[in-house]
Image (cartoon, rainbow, N blue to C red):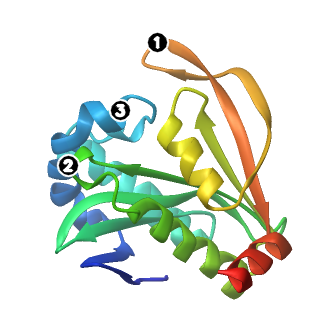
């Protein structure tokens, strides 16, 4: 699975079940901020829940149906990116992210997501990468824009989170668009 430096003291590496304590501590630092729009903060409420989530992703990695990576800044876990779904037959994947407040504004999510999309498109033959974001989550929508994704529409009341329904924006990038954008960078 892809791993590597992101620049400025940041690195990307797979998150494994043995990282459960570190990830739970990271979630504790940013739980309310992260949990405003994504459920991972609630799923990682304690070490057991975090380990269970990481075991799900370890099984997905083994089955080649999903991946999860941590973003570390100066050796400290501050966020992550994932392929919630990864389908090599249909050549599609759904990417996502989270970041604790202390690491916001450094371009970490954009760089990490760029790295995993590069890997998916160039190494794994993925043709389409989807990105879903609450229409209230301006930071996530901004990442989709910075990645050169196209907004395809709005799924009304599609996401139930903490007892509230959210509209979800659907963004995507296709492999030819991604390659053209990367050549232009």
Left or right: residue 67 versus residue 71 is right
The residue labelled by disc 1 is 163
Q: CA distance from mark 2 to mark 1?
A: 23 Å
Label ID, residue 35? 3
Marked residue nearer the N-terminal end (2 or 1): 2
Residue 30 appears in which quarter of the rendering?
A: top left
Mark 3 or 2, which is nearer the eye? 3
Left or right: residue 65 versus residue 21 is right
What is the count of numbered marks? 3
Residue 9 appears in which quarter of the rendering?
A: bottom left
Residue 136 in the image: above or below residue 84? above
Q: Position of residue 164 (x, y in %)?
A: 50, 13
Q: Are marks 2 and 1 in contact (CB under 8 Å)?
A: no
Q: Position of residue 18 (x, y in %)?
A: 23, 67
Q: CA distance from mark 3 to mark 2?
A: 13 Å
Query: Residue at 72% of width from left, 81% of height from top?
Result: 184
Marked residue nearer the N-terminal end (3 or 1): 3
Q: CA distance from mark 3 to mark 1?
A: 13 Å
Query: Residue at 76% of width from left, 80% of height from top?
Result: 179
Secondary structure beneath disc 2? helix
Residue furthest out toward the front: 184
Left or right: residue 36 versus residue 166 is left
The residue labelled by disc 2 is 24
Q: Position of residue 95 (x, y in %)?
A: 60, 56
Query: Residue at 66% of width from left, 30% of height from top?
Result: 168
Residue 65 in the image: above or below residue 49? below
Q: Specify the quadrant that holds the C terminus.
A: bottom right
Q: Position of residue 175 (x, y in %)?
A: 80, 73
Secondary structure beneath disc 3? helix
The foreground one among 62 and 27 is: 27
Mark 3 or 1, which is nearer the eye? 3
């Amino acid at each position: 699975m892809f791993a590597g430096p992101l620049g400025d003291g940041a690195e990307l590496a797979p998150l494994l079940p043995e990282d459960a304590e570190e990830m739970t501590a990271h979630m504790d630092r940013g739980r309310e901020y992260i949990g405003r729009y994504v459920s991972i903060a609630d799923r990682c409420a304690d070490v057991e829940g975090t380990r269970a989530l990481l075991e799900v992703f370890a099984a997905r990695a083994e089955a080649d149906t999903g991946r999860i990576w941590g973003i570390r800044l100066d050796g400290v876990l501050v966020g992550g990116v994932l392929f919630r779904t990864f389908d090599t037959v249909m050549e599609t994947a759904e990417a996502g992210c989270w970041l604790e407040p202390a690491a916001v504004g450094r371009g970490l999510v954009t760089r990490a997501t760029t790295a995993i999309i590069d890997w998916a498109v160039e190494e794994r033959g993925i043709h389409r990468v989807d990105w879903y974001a609450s229409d209230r989550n301006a930071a996530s929508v901004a990442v989709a824009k910075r990645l050169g994704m196209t907004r395809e529409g709005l799924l009304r009341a599609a996401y139930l989170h903490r007892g509230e329904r959210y509209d979800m924006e659907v963004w995507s990038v296709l492999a030819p668009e991604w390659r053209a954008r990367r050549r232009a960078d």
